[in-house]
Image (cartoon, rainbow, N blue to C red):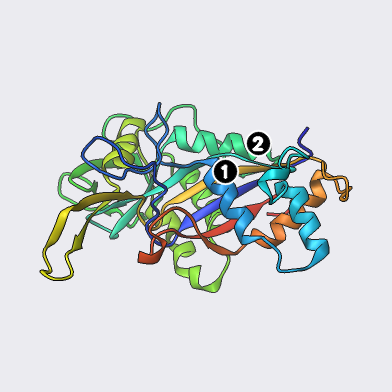
């Protein structure tokens, strides 16, 4: 039984290609998505592997024992001996950047995406300081904060233009947008000084969209890159060496849940709270790589781990 919980945030500093392999469709190498919603995800097996790799100790015996207690045996032939204490969920999208006519880009979200975040926070015993409204924006309206950087003044009234779609900015829920933006800036974005601008501007660039509009953006506004391989002698494209690859854009925010049980490794007697605390110290504020195309700059994410009483 889980004894400790924490929220894990992953902020994409470069495009992230958490792929599914080749597919039949318009994109040869698509990203991982939920089957029902179509939202981008990073599957738990990918996340756990990355966390395991980035916390692998270098020779310290005590650290190696704790690492084994958290993640299970490194040697696959010993996997039957005991399970690790750590349980990881998929990373789900919370904020998705979309090109904006004003303010360069908007951090978009929707009530279903936020409801999932609220549910994860409740499971972790973390107070967010914001409460979801019963109904989200409808039609072509978009909730924004007062003084939003996304709103364009016009004779017929203000408008928010994302890609080629226009929305009517609605500030009746501005207090909610303000509370949400402030909490995410404090808890989800990296804590370093280099993120000062991003934290100060998150709320003014935050936009809560109707459910269908958000779904359409996360489906059709990802980055798609075309790759080729050139023949060395002719510098022309090799036969069959033209393909496309999809990636989640930089500035996307994902969230998931970490839980820990008591150690099942006989040499370590720590409870789940102690083991999760050990892991948090090695993850919070760190950068790592998730997904493929690492050698071409993809997959750089900054991690935040938030526990009850620690935010």
Q: Are marks 2 and 1 in contact (CB under 8 Å)?
A: no
Is residue 187 in view from this perspective?
no
The answer to whether residue 11 is left or right of residue 96 is right
Is residue 310 in view from this perspective?
yes
Q: Is residue 140 above or below residue 96?
A: above
* Quadrant of res 25: top left
On-image quarter of the C terminus? bottom right
Count the numbered circles shown.
Answer: 2
x and y percentages locating residue 59 in the rendered image: 75, 68
Mark 2 Cα shell of 10 Å, populated few (<14), some (14-19), many (≥20):
some
The answer to whether residue 178 is left or right of residue 71 is left
x and y percentages locating residue 286 in the rendered image: 59, 64
Q: Foreground mark, 2 or 1?
A: 1
Residue position for label 1: 256
Element at label 2: helix
Instruction: Tell me the number on the disc at residue 122.
Output: 2
x and y percentages locating residue 277 in the rendered image: 76, 54
Q: Is residue 71 above or below residue 112?
A: below
x and y percentages locating residue 240 in the rendered image: 18, 50
Q: Out of 236 and 9, give the one closest to the viewer.
A: 236
């Amino acid at each position: 039984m889980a004894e400790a919980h924490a929220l894990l945030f992953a902020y994409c500093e470069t495009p992230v290609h958490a792929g599914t392999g080749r597919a039949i469709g318009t994109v040869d190498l698509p990203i991982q998505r939920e089957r029902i919603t179509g939202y981008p995800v990073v599957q738990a097996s990918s996340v756990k592997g990355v966390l395991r790799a980035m916390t692998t100790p270098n020779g310290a015996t005590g650290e190696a024992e704790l690492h084994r207690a958290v993640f299970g045996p490194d040697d696959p032939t010993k996997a039957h001996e005991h399970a690790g204490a750590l349980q990881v969920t998929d990373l789900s999208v919370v904020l998705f950047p979309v090109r904006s006519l004003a303010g360069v880009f908007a951090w978009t979200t929707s009530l279903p995406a936020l409801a999932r975040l609220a549910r994860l926070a409740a499971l972790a015993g973390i107070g967010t300081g914001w409460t979801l409204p019963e109904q989200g924006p409808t039609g072509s309206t978009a909730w924004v904060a007062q003084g939003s950087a996304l709103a364009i003044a016009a004779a017929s009234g203000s408008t928010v233009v994302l890609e080629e779609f226009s929305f009517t900015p609605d500030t009746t829920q501005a207090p909610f947008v303000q509370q949400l933006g402030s909490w995410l800036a404090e808890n989800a974005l990296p804590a370093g000084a280099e993120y000062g601008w991003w934290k100060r501007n998150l709320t003014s660039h935050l936009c809560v969209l109707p459910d269908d509009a958000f779904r359409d953006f996360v489906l059709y506004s990802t980055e798609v890159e075309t790759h080729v391989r050139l023949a060395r002698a002719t510098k022309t494209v090799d036969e069959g060496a033209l393909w496309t690859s999809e990636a989640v854009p930089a500035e996307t925010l994902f969230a998931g849940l970490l839980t820990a049980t008591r150690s099942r490794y006989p040499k370590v007697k720590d409870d789940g709270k102690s083991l999760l605390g050990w892991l948090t110290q090695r993850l919070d504020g760190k950068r790592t790589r998730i997904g493929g195309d690492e050698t071409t700059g993809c997959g750089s994410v900054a991690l935040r781990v938030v526990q009850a009483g620690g935010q």
